[in-house]
Image (cartoon, grey):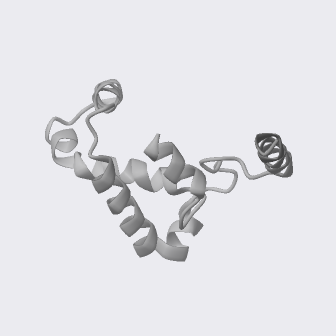
Amino acid sequence: MLLWEVLWTHHLSEHLHLYVCVAILKRHRKKIMGEQMDFDTLLKFINELSGHINLNAALRDAEALCICAGENGEASIPPGTPPSLPVDDDTALMYSQQDDNDSL
């Protein structure tokens, strides 16, 4: 839940989820590169990390990567890459309606 909550804040970037992915890959790069994992093996390895990631360290590394990358990092993300949480008007309206209902 903590990971989702952090991603939904769009803290530093609406693409923070990409920096989190890079932080996780960076932390495990020796094993990934040392075993020269092909795509299927890499996918299996990443899936098996579920529940075993030091989330605080990954978020701290992702934040540092995001800050270091700055505008150059944002510029390197292809246009049309979805954010961690859509921020269109329909979504904002949906959340504001939920907040109104919660206060009743």
Quadrant location of the C terminus in the rendered image: top right
Q: Residue at x 24, y 33 (%)?
A: 37
Q: Is residue 12 above or below residue 23?
A: below
Q: Residue at x 57, y 59 (%)?
A: 77
Q: Residue at x 61, y 56 (%)?
A: 78
Q: Horizontally, is 35 left or right of 44 in the view?
A: left
Q: Nearer the viewer, residue 21 or 29?
A: 21
Q: Horizontally, is 89 left or right of 70 in the view?
A: right
At which x and y percent is residue 44?
A: 31, 24
At which x and y percent is residue 80?
A: 70, 51
Q: Horizontally, is 36 left or right of 70 in the view?
A: left
How many numbered marks are there?
A: 0
At which x and y percent is residue 53?
A: 28, 41
Q: Residue at x 84, y 44 (%)?
A: 97
Q: Is residue 37 above or below residue 86?
A: above
Q: Nearer the viewer, residue 104 or 34?
A: 104
Q: Is residue 7 above or below residue 63?
A: above
Q: Horizontally, is 29 left or right of 22 in the view?
A: left
Q: Is residue 53 above or below residue 72?
A: above
Q: Nearer the viewer, residue 24 or 53?
A: 53
At which x and y percent is residue 83?
A: 63, 51
